[in-house]
Image (cartoon, rainbow, N blue to C red):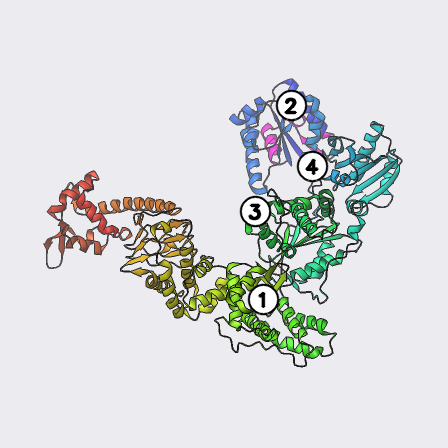
Amino acid sequence: MEKHNLFISYSWDSEEHKGWTKNIADRLEEFNEFHIAFDQYNLDSFEDKNLFMEQGVFQTDIVLVIVTPTYVEKANRRLGGVGIETKMSASRHWEESSSLGKSKIIPLLREGNCLPNYLKEKFFIDFRSDDNFEKSFHDLLKHIIDDAKERRPTKKHSIHQLPPIKNLTRIEDFLKINHKKRKLVFDKNETTDFSSKNRIKFELWETRSPSIDYYLFLFENITLSSTIKRFCELVKRDKIKIKTLTVLRENRSEKGYLRRMLLENGIDLELTELTYSEYIWDFCIDDDAKNNKGTYKNPFFIDQPLVDKNDEQELGPAFEYIIKQLNLPQQSAAKIIVAPGGTGKTTLCQHIAGHYQGSGNAVSVLMQSEELKSEGFGVLSENTKIESVYDLYETYARICERQGDGGFIFDKVTFEVALLTGKLVLIIDGIDEFISIFPEMFNLDLFLQSIDDLNNELASSKIIVTSRNDVFNEAITAKYENIDKYNLLGFDNKACDKYLKKRFGKYDNSEKMIRKVLSNIEPLIIKDKDERIMPFIVDLLSSIVEDASENDDIRLDLSFDGKDYKSNEDITDYLVYSILRRESVRQSIEIKISEVLDLFLEIAASYTEIFPRAVLEELVSAYYSENAENLTGKLLKNPLIELDKEYCRFKYDFISDYFRGLSIINSITKKRSDDDFVLLASKYAFGDGGAFKEVIKYFNSRSEEFIECAQRILKDIRRGISLEDVFSKRDIKFKAISFFVEVLSFINGVSTSKEEFSEVIKRLFSANGEIKHLAIYGNAKTIDFSGMRVVGSRFVGYNGFTSSKFEGARFVNCYFEGINGNSISESFKADMFESCRLGDLENIIDVVKQKLENNREVLEKELRKFFGSFFRRNKFTDQKKAFVKFSDRTGLNSAFFNELIKRGVIVIFNEKADETYYSISDHYKDSVYGFLVNNKIDKKTEEIIKIVEK
């Protein structure tokens, strides 16, 4: 048994106060575990009072200080016995606080509001109310035995595996699906109680249909026994007669447990217990939806690796991993799969959807952007907004219904409740395409918020989203951190082999077919840095070999023999040219391969992936009128094109970028400067996009050819640009010019050094010391503008501008926008702009002006020290150079000194054999005196300052 020695420090305010203090001492002394050092117990005329106080403060476990206003005054002023005890207690308090982090002194506040100064930061035990004495005394006991603080909860979680947020608010929605007449029986304030150690939360609902039924909803993280007890108390209080009760909760309790608790609390009724998901599945989802098996599944599906987008960890086969995650009891808000077109996202989505169709476990809904691309959307109103996951579902369902393929359509409440319970697996294939299809309608932020809100109800929502591009920027990702993001990797050699065996297994010559495809796949895989290939390429090559399987000679030679157009001759060229060449023979196309390609390039230059069939027909008619219909029919059979009613599209999303890149390359090498080319080039003013990369790849080893072609094209583009064009919103020509500058920033031989880049820019844009109609949009390299007059040029988002060199440069009638350079070169001058629209550049100019003002102030101060070397005791004097006060920080150095001699500001006063003395010239003494004494800057002094500034 642990003993506690306690010392009581108090003041003799009155006999009543002494009696109250003795009562405290007596109550404590009655405990076996306590020994009390108390003057009324220990002191008489024979005892050493001071020794008793010293031992009481320093040799006991705890000091109890009984605080009254009188005690506070004596303690703070160190008066009497209280003062002596205070001096010693303060020493103990600070020593224990510094070594242990806490002191064993407990203040008991009997009267007043203040504690002694040395104890002011302490919590006190309040004994001011005699009515609350017992409670205060109980608190004191807990403090003495160190049991006053609340105990920490048992560790249950890891910061690396955060428990999901759950806040079930949509209880009524569960009943709303089947019960139009319903009411909440008890007020929520009566059924929710988390005070003290209670954990009670439930809702009781009454429904009429027409019979009366009762539903009891039990929430998570409650104390079930306390909750059932409260439920029974309220039912008996209001004399509610319940014959049958359906209990709904997230997870089931032990069989018979709920009924036993109800009986223990005096309630006997017929009980049915269901989980939320069971209730939704059995009573709210139509059987037609459960039995829907309409999703097509590619018979040759091969699972491919999935990678965590955050840490790039490979997670295993995508389908297997996603299904495993969807089977977990807790779900992230959404699982987003990002990968380029042709990587197999749609095939994966089809198999996930198919897995749940008819499974008896959940309903799958697959929404594919591909199905909507050719639709005119006349069914949509101008007020249509997609601001939630249901908005997208409803819009998609209405369009599909209009196309005669509505299938089973959920109402809003059923859709959302089924989704939040995990009984509806929603798969959105191509979110980036949905956004582009409904550009003015789609609010991605609110859409993700709706997904997050639904999952916060039960953390059970099962939502898969795919996207070709990562439309989820850093801000969105940070805001909705409960979203998992993945990448698909594509096929490696092993996956290719598995796919081909599955696909060609039914053929007699399957081994030969597999070898043929592999012979064309392997060079492509070798060229890829990750040694992988997009599944679509394997599919494409397999289709071609499969089509030729009836012939003994299976041929698809991937070579560039006979190619007469410019290209990079890489993987994509390899495939496209081979396909075009094969189709030329297969379809007996009369025109050359390069002419077929020109038709595709012209379409790609004006359209993205989708274009009307009529466009191709009109284009073919314009060039080949005699055989237009026949030729169009043959072109529409090309494997690179898909036809859907009156619309066509390039089968794979990168193809349009590839064709635009080829179009730009061929236009540059042919030195075209027509409006169509200018418009196409202007789309890549900022130096980004797949087409731009194709151009860079081609001209990387052909920099001189590019510069020669650019010189001719730029001359034509710049011709006719007027002053009004510089400040016009229609800046197509300037954007096209910027495209050429951006290419120069990347290609070898020009981009390797700032000096070379500057020289090429001057070569293309300058004449007679004047750069005219230059345009830079985005982050090109810095330029040396020194000594140049830049006229009629545009700089947009060019953050490298302020880091350039500007010695003697001037900018006249130029347009600036979005210039936010972090680095400002020393040669940047605030006064070098004339008749310019400065935009954000004005902020930088203000910074430079402020810096100049600060520098000027320092310069003048250092110049006074310099001239002060020649002015002593109110008179000019001669001085040796060694004793002149120079300042390299401001340019007041030997070169400056020699310049002043050259200009006659300083003259030689006396020259001896080994020493030379200098003085201020008589012509400058008045100016120097005025500057030193009166801070006056006249014309001569200003000229001297300008020497330093230069």
Residue under label 2, please give it.
128
At label 1, the amino acid type is: Glu
Image side of residue 844 versus residue 133, left or right: left
Question: Is residue 690 in view?
Answer: no
- Quadrant position of the N terminus in the picture: top right
Q: Is residue 75 above or below residue 431?
A: above
Label 4 SS: loop
Label 3 SS: loop
At label 2, the amino acid type is: Arg
CB-based contact (under 8 Å), mark 3 and mark 4: no
Q: Is residue 98 magenta?
A: no
Q: Which residues are magenta?
A: 29-58
At label 4, the amino acid type is: Ile
Residue 661 placed where, x, y %? 49, 64
Distance from the alpha carbon under mark 1 to that under mark 3: 37 Å
CB-based contact (under 8 Å), mark 3 and mark 2: no
Lower position in the chain sequence, tag 4 or tag 1: 4
For disc 2, the neighbor class at 10 Å (few under 14, some 14 to 19, many from 20) is some
For disc 1, the neighbor class at 10 Å (few under 14, some 14 to 19, many from 20) is some
Residue under label 3, please give it.
440
Distance from the alpha carbon under mark 1 to that under mark 2: 103 Å
Q: Which of label 3 and label 2 is nearer to you?
A: 3
Lower position in the chain sequence, tag 3 or tag 4: 4
Distance from the alpha carbon under mark 3 to that under mark 2: 68 Å
Distance from the alpha carbon under mark 3 to that under mark 4: 68 Å
Distance from the alpha carbon under mark 4 to that under mark 1: 99 Å
Residue 11 placed where, x, y %? 60, 23
Q: Nearer the viewer, residue 526 or 904?
A: 526
Lower position in the chain sequence, tag 3 or tag 2: 2
Residue under label 4, please give it.
145
Lower position in the chain sequence, tag 1 or tag 3: 3
Label 2 SS: loop
